[in-house]
Amino acid sequence: MAAAAFAQSFDAPLTDEATRLRRIARLNGLARLMDTALRVPGTNIRFGADALIGLVPGIGDAGGALIGLFIVNEARRLGLPKRKLARMVGNLGIDAAFGAVPLAGDLFDVYFKAHKRNIQVILDHFDMERSDLKDVTPKRR
C-alpha cells in the first residue's frame, strides 16, 4: 500500500503555487550550475559543469544529458505538455550529439546552453520570468 502511494506521487502533477515556484527555482539553480556557473575572467563568456564534465571522454556528455533528463522529468511532474517535453529532450539531444565531438563539442557546450533553454521552456509554460524565481527558498527558523 505504501509503495503504491509512493509510486503515485511521481505521477501526480504539482498544483501548489509555492511548491511549484520552489521546484522551478531549484531547477533553475541546477541549470545555472550546469551552464553558467563560471565566467572566463575579463569576458562575458560563461560556462558550467556541463562543459567541464564534457571533457571526460565517453561518459562526460552522457552525464550532462542524464542531469538534463532530471530537469525534463521534473517538468513532466509539473504538468508540461508532451510537445514541450519533446522540445526539451530535443535540446538535450542536440547538446549531447554536438558535445560528443572532441574539442569542438566542448566549445559548443559553452555556447549552446541546453539546460537554460529547457528552464526557459518551463518558465514560458507558466508565463513566468526569471525574476519571479528570486528568494523563494523558505526561511530557516
Image (spheres, helix red, strand yellow):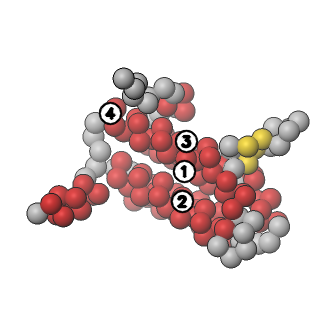
Name which residue lies at 41% across and 53% down: 74
Q: In this view, does 114 lie to the left or right of 47?
A: left
Disc 2 marks which residue? 67
The answer for how far apart the CA atoms under marks 3 and 2 are is: 12 Å
The answer for how far apart the CA atoms under marks 4 and 2 are is: 24 Å
Q: Nearer the viewer, mark 4 or mark 2?
A: 2
Q: Is residue 51 visible?
A: yes
Earlier-in-chain disc, 3 versus 2: 3
Marking on residue 29: 3
Residue 105 at x, y percent in the picture: 77, 66
Query: For numbered disc 2, what is the local secondary structure?
Result: helix
Q: Which image quadrant for residue 140?
A: top left
Name which residue lies at 41% across and 42% down: 23
Q: Nearer the viewer, residue 67 or 78?
A: 67
Q: Three-letter amino acid code at disc 2?
A: Ile
Q: Is residue 116 visible?
A: no
- Local crowd size for mark 1, using a 10 Å CA cut-off: few (<14), some (14–19), many (≥20): many
Marking on residue 17: 4
Earlier-in-chain disc, 4 versus 2: 4
The answer for how far apart the CA atoms under marks 1 and 4 are is: 20 Å
Earlier-in-chain disc, 4 versus 3: 4
